[in-house]
């Protein structure tokens, strides 16, 4: 019996909120929440991905639901390894048929060498032959289709679940970048705090995330030149005073106010990146503008808010949610390019 020998090239966006896996020949082949559920009594893995996410806030005491990545880095090494192994089994069901696996992983630009090594080791434990690491904003730029190798500078902000990475790229490398651990998760926390303070309503992270996605905004919606009617949604949780279940109607204006602080911190990161840019690249960016990627890019009005604050043209990437994963995967089309772009071009 002859084995079907081939090389499997994968790009992985190991995100705080979601894990995406990109195959060079098939595109995005997995997109699952970065969540795992384990039975503490017998250490049995009960679920990963979407099924595990549905257990958040609902599981009994003996079931632990874990988000093993926090603020863009691995906080639970064992659970991350187990979760990733399960995801890889879904996309490579017959590992015996694969003689060589090469993986590029996206990591936040501000991670330490120790944090990066944890990511590399986790992937390497899966039996991967070669592991390369790309900074997420650089991978996002590749995924969006920006010319990262030319002399003209381009700017991108990747606003994910755990981190916001803003970078200016030219001549095949990151010239200047800012990584802040304020992104989607901090927005959810801000909404939870706002609802508790203003409505005496205690809501869960899932409810906060739904409010952000459904009615969240950074600027008021407009109909022509006049502000339109704010969107509304029911928020369900527990009354802080009585302890009883409670439902209140929340408007998009409430969510806009709740998000003022995290959005302000992201704006500070964008300004810091621009202030430290060389004048020549700053001139390029005036012409080309900035691109937004990541789930945070889809927050209504964020692009207009950045335009108002900076005077730059801001474009939301069409593949904002998949940009990092696609960038890591596409980079493997040229292994020499991967070695050059990778921050630690080391083969394992």
Image (spheres, rainbow, N blue to C red):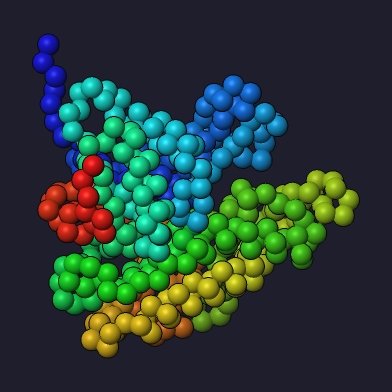
Q: Residue furthest top?
A: 1
Q: Is residue 83 visible?
A: no
Q: Residue furthest right?
A: 242
Residue at the (76%, 64%) spot, across then down = 197
Which residue occupies the foreground of this view, 268 or 41?
Answer: 41
Which residue occupies the foreground of this view, 148 or 108?
Answer: 108
Number of marks: 0
Indicate the quadrant containing the C terminus: top left, top right, bottom left or bottom right. top left
Residue 314, horizontal then vertical, whole percent? 36, 74
Q: Within the image, what quadrant is residue 107 found in?
A: bottom left
Residue 128, horizontal then vertical, whole percent? 26, 36
Indicate the quadrant containing the N terminus: top left, top right, bottom left or bottom right. top left
Q: Residue furthest front?
A: 114
Residue 126, horizontal then vertical, whole percent? 33, 33
Q: Is residue 57 left or right of residue 330?
A: right
Residue at the (36%, 49%) spot, across then down = 117
Above/below status of 16 relative to 178: above
Above/below status of 23 relative to 162: above
Q: Is residue 100 left or right of residue 114?
A: left
Q: Is residue 191 visible?
A: yes
Residue 308, horizontal then vertical, whole percent? 45, 83
Above/below status of 58 relative to 224: above
Residue at the (49%, 71%) spot, across then down = 266
Residue at the (35%, 42%) spot, across then down = 121
Q: Is residue 192 left or right of residue 226?
A: right
Which residue occupies the foreground of this view, 127 or 236?
Answer: 127
Q: Within the image, what quadrant is residue 20 found in?
A: top left
């Amino acid at each position: 019996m002859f084995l079907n020998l081939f090389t499997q090239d994968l790009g992985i966006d190991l995100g705080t909120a979601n894990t995406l896996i990109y195959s060079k020949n098939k595109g995005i082949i997995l997109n699952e929440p970065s969540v795992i559920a384990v039975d503490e009594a017998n250490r049995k893995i009960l679920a990963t991905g979407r099924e595990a996410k549905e257990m958040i806030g609902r599981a009994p005491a003996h079931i632990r639901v874990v988000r093993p990545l926090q603020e863009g880095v691995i906080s639970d090494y064992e659970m991350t390894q187990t979760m990733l192994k399960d995801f890889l089994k879904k996309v490579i069901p017959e590992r015996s048929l694969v003689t060589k696996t090469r993986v590029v992983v996206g990591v936040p630009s501000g991670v330490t060498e120790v944090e990066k090594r944890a990511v590399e080791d986790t992937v390497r434990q899966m039996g991967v032959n070669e592991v390369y690491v790309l900074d997420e904003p650089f991978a996002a730029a590749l995924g969006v289709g920006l010319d990262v190798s030319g002399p003209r500078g381009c700017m991108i902000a990747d606003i994910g679940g755990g981190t916001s990475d803003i970078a200016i790229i030219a001549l095949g490398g990151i010239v200047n970048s800012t990584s802040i651990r304020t992104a989607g998760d901090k927005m959810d926390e801000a909404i939870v705090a706002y609802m508790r303070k203003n409505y005496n309503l205690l809501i869960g992270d899932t409810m906060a995330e739904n409010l952000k996605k459904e009615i969240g905004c950074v600027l008021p919606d407009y109909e022509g030149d006049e502000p339109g009617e704010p969107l509304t949604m029911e928020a369900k949780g527990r009354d802080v005073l009585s302890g009883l279940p409670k439902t209140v109607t929340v408007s998009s204006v409430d969510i806009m106010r709740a998000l003022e602080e995290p959005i302000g911190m992201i704006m500070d990161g964008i300004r810091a990146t621009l202030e430290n840019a060389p004048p020549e690249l700053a001139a390029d960016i005036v012409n080309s503008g900035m691109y937004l990627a990541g789930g945070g890019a889809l927050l209504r009005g964020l692009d207009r808010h950045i335009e108002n604050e900076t005077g730059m043209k801001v474009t939301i990437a069409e593949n904002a949610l998949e940009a990092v994963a696609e960038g890591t995967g596409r980079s493997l089309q040229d292994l020499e390019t991967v070695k050059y772009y990778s921050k630690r071009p080391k083969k394992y």
